Amino acid sequence: IAKWQLEKVQNERTTNERLFEIENTRLVRSFDAQQSAIERGAKLQLSRPLLQEGEKLQIQEQSLNRQIANQIAFNQQEAALEKQFGINSVKDQEKRKADLENP
């Protein structure tokens, strides 16, 4: 009986890890797409020929603020996903912290 219980626990852990990987991949792709859209939008706005320097700086600031907000939302979703599937990854937490510090 102990052997089967151990096997059951191991199977549950493996399943949770696989489900986490699937959901995490989806989350990362969504995050990357949003970051790219923010960057494209800023480049498009900055390509207007009659922009003043102050307007350019304001567009860049807004873009960075959106990217930071997107990063924070991603980090929160990632943490919730780890909690949901019982995944504890110090390495991933440190990476998200570094991403916030260096947008």
Image (tube, rainbow, N blue to C red):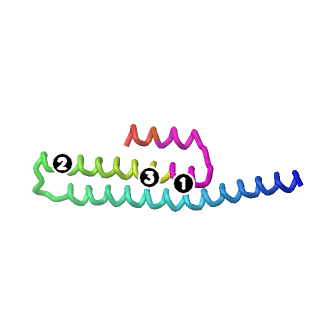
Q: Position of residue 11 (x, y in %)?
A: 76, 57
> Amino acid type of disc 3?
Phe
> Amino acid type of disc 2?
Gln
Q: Position of residue 33 (x, y in %)?
A: 41, 61
Q: Secondary structure at mark 1?
A: helix
Stretch in magenta? 79-96
Q: Which residue is mark 1?
A: 81
The residues tagged by marks 3 and 1 sit, at their Cα atoms, a distance apart of 10 Å
Q: Secondary structure at mark 2?
A: helix
Task: Look at discs 3 and 1 and give the one toward the viewer.
Answer: 1
Q: Which residue is mark 3?
A: 74
Does the stretch in magenta take in 93? yes
Q: Which residue is mark 2?
A: 58
* Near-viewer residue (52 or 89): 89
First in sequence: mark 1 or mark 2? Answer: 2
Q: Secondary structure at mark 3?
A: helix
